[in-house]
Amino acid sequence: MEKESQTIFDKNVIEFVTVAAEFCAFLERAERMKRSDFVDTSLKILSLLYLKASMLPKCETIGDEVLETYVTEEIYEILRINIAELMGDKDDYLDVFVQDMVYSDQPIKKSISEDLADIYQDIRDFIFVFQLGLNETMNDSLALCQENFGMLWGQKLVNTLRALHDVKYNQQEEDDEATEGDEEGFYEPSDGDSCCEEDGCHCHDDDCHCHEDGCHCHHEE
């Protein structure tokens, strides 16, 4: 009993619990966030969660009872749907680092929302049992969480990080280029080249944007 007490109150365990609890709270309020803020914060907190999980001391199960769980199918689905709606068309991504790729030569389509919901389920169940304050179950929940990190949610976490990084940086550049392309359809006359003359504007009404300093017309092909 003394050994597990030392483990569950280790400095690295306390820090992991703190980050894990904040991660869960963050996802639970995701529906009220802007997508850009959600992506930015997700990148930071997921990176920190991975770091803290990798620093956990070795922990072994000592009990034989099945641990309680917190996340029901309804809780899982509500969280996943909220994140999917927030991410919109940026939710899906192609993943080549999954076990199913052994049987396929094509990338597998995954979703950020489902990955985060899967990670949340493991982490939230761990937090739920850990916060009950019983040394034996705290120890066993930590051992299970640590095992699942190595076998399940750790890999999903790094896959999701890659997808979120692409949303924040690479796809943002595409959006910027598209915005610039939209502006190419306008013609802004140089000095002495205004379409607004003394007798009025020679542009079609739908094409003209006149201001005090001149007239900006859609470029006529």
Image (cartoon, rainbow, N blue to C red):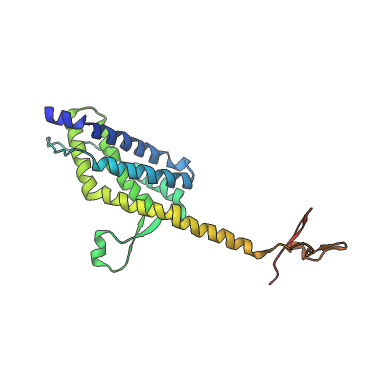
Name which quarter of the figure residue 38 lies in. Answer: top left
Q: Residue at x 15, y 31 (%)?
A: 4
Name which quarter of the figure residue 20 lies in. Answer: top left
Q: How many marks?
A: 0
User: Percent from the top left, x then y, of residue 14?
Assistant: 26, 32
- Quadrant of the snapshot with the N terminus: top left
User: Percent from the top left, x then y, of residue 134?
Assistant: 20, 28
Front-lying residue, 5 or 194:
194
Against 158, residue 69 (above or below) is: above
Front-lying residue, 163 or 90:
163
Report whether residue 74 is seen: no
Q: Residue at x 35, y 51 (%)?
A: 161
Residue farthest toward the front in the current orientation of the protein: 191
Q: Residue at x 21, y 48 (%)?
A: 150
Q: Please give left or right for residue 30 compared with residue 116 in the image.
A: right
Q: Residue at x 34, y 47 (%)?
A: 116
User: Percent from the top left, x then y, of residue 212?
Assistant: 79, 53
Against 93, residue 133 (above or below) is: above
Report whether residue 151 is seen: yes
- Quadrant of the snapshot with the C terminus: bottom right
Q: Please give left or right for residue 43 compared with residue 173 in the image.
A: left
Against 184, residue 168 (above or below) is: above
User: Percent from the top left, x then y, of residue 71?
Assistant: 30, 40
Residue farthest toward the right in the current orientation of the protein: 199
Front-lying residue, 192 or 8:
192
